[in-house]
Image (tube, rainbow, N blue to C red):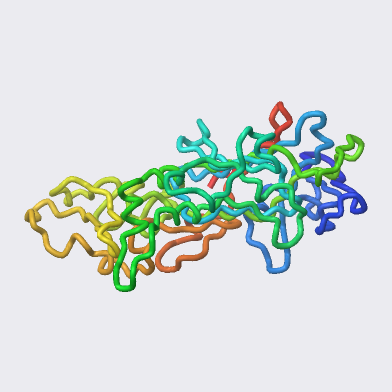
Amino acid sequence: MGRTGLERSGDRRTTGLENPYLCAECDVSMLGLSHPPHLMVDAEVPDTSTFWQSASWHRTHPEPLRANITFSWGREVELTHDVVITFQSRRPAALVLERSRDHGRSWRPLQFYADDCLEEFGMEQRRALDLLSEDVTKVICTEEYSGSFASKGIRTVRMEIQNRTALLAGPRLPPGRVSASPYGRMTANPALRDFLTLTDLRLSLLRPATGGTFIDKENLQKYHYAISDVLVPGRCQCNLHASECVFNAGRLACVCQHRTAGPDCSKCQRGFRSRRWRQGSYLPYPMGSANVCLPNNAPAAFPNHERIWSSSSPLEGSQRRLGDAEVTHRQGLGHGGGGAISHAALWPSVSSVENKEHSSGTQVLNFIF
């Protein structure tokens, strides 16, 4: 969306887009014509779609039309299910999803997307569904989500987390036999958890879809980006010692269990240090090991404290038993998982949004939670 003044984003006769509002006038100074960044993460009313809309290519030409959208949590979180971005416009012809583990100081790619991976990024196209177990952390380029017409059902772009975690599940066992997979395999080989752990997530939009048509510089107003929804399911990194994550003094902090303490439950409470602090464990399956911090005067063999998942809190589901704070962020609201998790506290409405234009013409949007 244009930062100041009025901008016309297209002509319905030439764009052929499903949503007529994408072809109307955009004006940042008027509520009804404004499509600011926070509309990507707001709570939508059923049958009503709100969306952020970028400036048109007309504003940046002859430079490429690019936009960076960054989500920052101020602490480490772990992706647990598919990241889903829903576009209101055509899906971009080229984009990159990136992660940072040092609060935006450095970035590494999670996945590339293009209508032609070889031409755009010099990579052969692959699907997460086709990966082998030894490729569980491989960064790929996919052509599955790029360049399609923006009609219902095919407007989403995914980072397919679940297809990757399924690689750790191993073969199905006969009835009656219980497998520790994928939890045991994740404990023994934490590479995937490291790959999915981040403090910041960045969506770099590199090239809008043109539908394969010739780009007429006199008609660049019809090319832009528009996003209605961003879904980032994840959980706080609490060392498997918490089932809730809330704001404390303006920062996200784990609500620690098992007599642990600290923002990440990474130490024992005072008076409970008869043995060295240990991270919780997925094993033995299915209940896991709490690795509770013991009282200072506890005997070496302290009964009934090694497996207290069911007695410490009424957790449900395999992920809940493991003790990390499971959350979902979608349009500023958390939902799913149930139980004692304070989703709204963990994923509040956007508290700060930076909307600026880089000297290169790239629009930079930073969401700070």
Q: Is residue 283 found left or right of 229 in the rendered image?
A: left
The residue closer to the viewer here, 85 or 352, is 85
Residue 354 visible in the snapshot:
no
Identified at 58% across, 57% down, the residue is: 330
Please name whichever residue, 46 or 285, is drawn nearer the observer in this view of the structure.
285
Q: Which of the pair 334/167 is nearer the observer?
A: 167
Residue shown at the point (19%, 60%) measured from the top left: 306
| Residue that sits furthest to the bottom in the current view | 176
Residue that appears at 29% across and 57% down: 257
Q: Is residue 3 above or below residue 241?
A: above
The vertical placement of 292 against 191, above or below, is below
- Relative image position of residue 83 (x, y in whole percent): 56, 52
Across and down, in percent, residue 130 comes to 53, 51
Which of the image's four quarters has the N terminus?
top right
Does any portion of residue 261 appear in the rendered image?
Answer: yes
User: Quadrant location of residue 16?
Assistant: bottom right
- On the image, the x and y values in percent for residue 72 come to 53, 43
Residue occupying image coordinates x 61% and y 36%? 123
Q: Decide if residue 14 is on the left or right side of residue 190.
A: right
